[in-house]
Each structure stands twice: as structure tokens, then as C-alpha cells.
Image: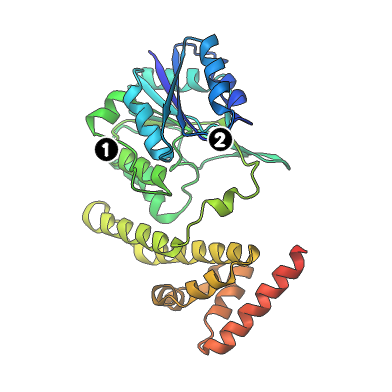
Amino acid sequence: MEISIIIPVFNSDKYIKKCINSILEQYYSCLEVIIVNDGSTDNTRSICQELASNDSRIKYFEIENSGPAVARNYGLSKATGDYIGFVDADDTIDANMYQTMINAAEINDLDIVMCGYRTVSNIDTVDIRINIPCQLMETTESIKENIIKRYYFGDSEGISSLCNKIYKRKFLEQHNLRIDETRVRAEDYWFNLNAFMNCERFIFINECFYNYFNVNDSSVMKSFRINQFELFLETRNKLIELNENVFLFDGVNARLDKDVLYSSLEYLHIMMLTQEFSIVIDFVNKKEFMDILDKSNINLLPRYYCFLSRVLSVKNKKMRLVLLCLIFASLKVRRK
């Protein structure tokens, strides 16, 4: 059985060689590495071409800069393996990752196999243990209860990632599963939700094989968008619609409101840290945000976010603005 590993790359010359070498050094050698250069302007091209010239398992392609979703779908169109895996250009994988996962897939005839991962930063390395039963799930009901439910009630660590999984290619083709190219964020989140909605056989391996490198201090900031609240709200509304029409979980709306509020407060804090005060003011004047804030139990939030919520809940707009300015000023002083 062959596995196709798809790597979208964009200006990754600092990391790509280490990434690809970790794949070529897999104990499972029946693989093809599909590199899709998404319009890089650094030395990524020459590095990838040199690697491809030295190993016939590497297939190198170039496209105009279109974003990771387009690059991954292009890689899928070129894949010939029985299984599909994804790796990000600045990450690495352990040598026994695909051997272990493909063995499990073959023995149990699985649509999807998932493993744990670790985060690697300049400070430390942390194994992320995912709280999912390590057992064969062979009904859509068991996958709904053990996997999809986590989209609604939290504890979804690792479930939405593309990179800690392998997918049977025939399964993806049968259900026409492709990554949504219209999304600029969370495309992997929705791809995996759709995949699990169609999945009939799944297993989780509680070993951390994937190494997610968080070496870019601005990566969190870059993951947000100006219309971030609208994106949070869109996710909430779509999940509610799916639940009403398909899943029928109880207590969903209140939980999703809490998730939107927590994510929004995290976003506001980052905007204040990066001195984007105009974005903060625009954000807190949104009626939808204030509606969610008013009906949420802020006492369940972490202490700082609880405090921030109380400030945002002040009805007098001038007083609210003064308090926000004080928080903003204190954060600005701390960063100096």
C-alpha cells in the first residue's frame, strides 16, 4: 500500500528540507511526497528541486500563489497512493508515524486514522494527549458520539487538524471530499467535520507522531482576520444549523455562544497587545457580540477574560471606552 504525502509550501526555505527529510526517513518507505510550491519568492524552489532530483519518490509541482487550500487540492489531484497524508512545510514527523498508522488502517479497513501530536517552541516541547477512546469505531453513531460531538462541546484538540491523520483515498473520492478553497481560515476544521460525517470506520492511536513547530511569534496574529467576529459567528450558525438538521445534540446553543465569546475575548486581547485599538472599538460596538455577551455566564470564564467581559458589559459607552483605554494603556506599558 502506498501513501501520498501532500506538502503545500510558501516561502519555507528555512524549514522545508528538515520537513521533507523527516518524511523520507520514514520506516514505511512505500510513499510519494507531493510538494506543491504555492508561488514562493525565496529559495524554496531550488531546495525542493534539489531534493526531488535525489529521490524519485518526490514529485514537485508549482502553482501561482493561491493559498494552502488550493495547493492541497492540487496535491490531491496528483496523488496516486492508497492513503493520503498532509504535512505542513515547517513541521516534522516521527520515523514510525506512517508505518504505525497504515498498519492500523490495513488491519481494520479504516477510512481515517488519527494520532496525537506535540507542539515544539523555542521554550519547550509538549505532548498533546487527545482525550479520545483508543478503540475501533465502526458505526457512524459511535463516530458521532466520540468525535463529532466534540465540535460542539469542546475537548476537540487535534480533531480538526489535517496533519495528524491519514485518509483512505477511495473514501475521499467516494464522498467527493475536498478542501473548501473559498475559506481563508479553518478550512481544515470544516474538511474534517465533513469527513467524519461520512466516515464509517475510524481509530485513534494515542501516540504523538506529529511535531507542530510554533517558531514564529507572529503566527497567532496572522491567523486572525479583520472580520474575525463574523467568522466566529459563521462557524456558530453553521454548527447550529447542522445540529438542528442532522445531529440533534442537546444544549448546543449555549455552549457555542460561550465558545464565540471566549474566542472573541482572546482575539480582543491580542488586538490590544498589538495596539490595534480601533479594531477593538469597532468589535465591541457590534450588536451580535454584545447580545452574546449579555446572555453568557461570564463567571465561568478565566479570571482575566471575566474581568474584560465586565468592562465590556458597562452600559455607558463613554465609561466603557475609558476603561478599555486604561486596559490598553497598561498592556502597552508592559510591552515596553
Secondary structure of residue under mark 1 = helix
Residue 223 vs residue 84: left or right? right
Q: Can residue 39 be seen in this view?
A: yes
Secondary structure of residue under mark 2 = loop
Q: Is residue 102 above or below residue 215?
A: above
- For residue 258, the mark is none
- Which amino acid type corresponds to the residue marked 2 in the rendered image? Asn
Q: Which colour scheme is used?
A: rainbow
Q: Which of 149 and 12 is in front in this view?
A: 12
Residue 251: % across, % down: 35, 63
Q: Can residue 142 be seen in this view?
A: no
**Residue behind mark 2:** 11
**Residue behind mark 1:** 198
Residue 117 vs residue 260: left or right? right
Task: Decide: few, some or many residues near mark 1? Use Cα within 10 Å; few <14, some 14-19, many ≥20.
Answer: some
Q: In this view, does 143 lie above or below 60?
A: below
Residue beneath the point at 53% across and 69% down:
279
Residue beneath the point at 63% across and 69% down:
304
Residue 44: % across, % down: 56, 28
Residue beneath the point at 28% across and 28% down:
171
In the picture, residue 319 is in which quadrant? Answer: bottom right
In the picture, residue 111 is in which quadrant? Answer: top left
Q: Upstream in the sequence, badge 2 or badge 1?
A: 2
Q: Distance between the residues labelled 2 and 1?
A: 35 Å
Residue 172 vs residue 313: left or right? left
Q: Is residue 138 above or below residue 54?
A: below
- Which amino acid type corresponds to the residue marked 1 in the rendered image? Asn
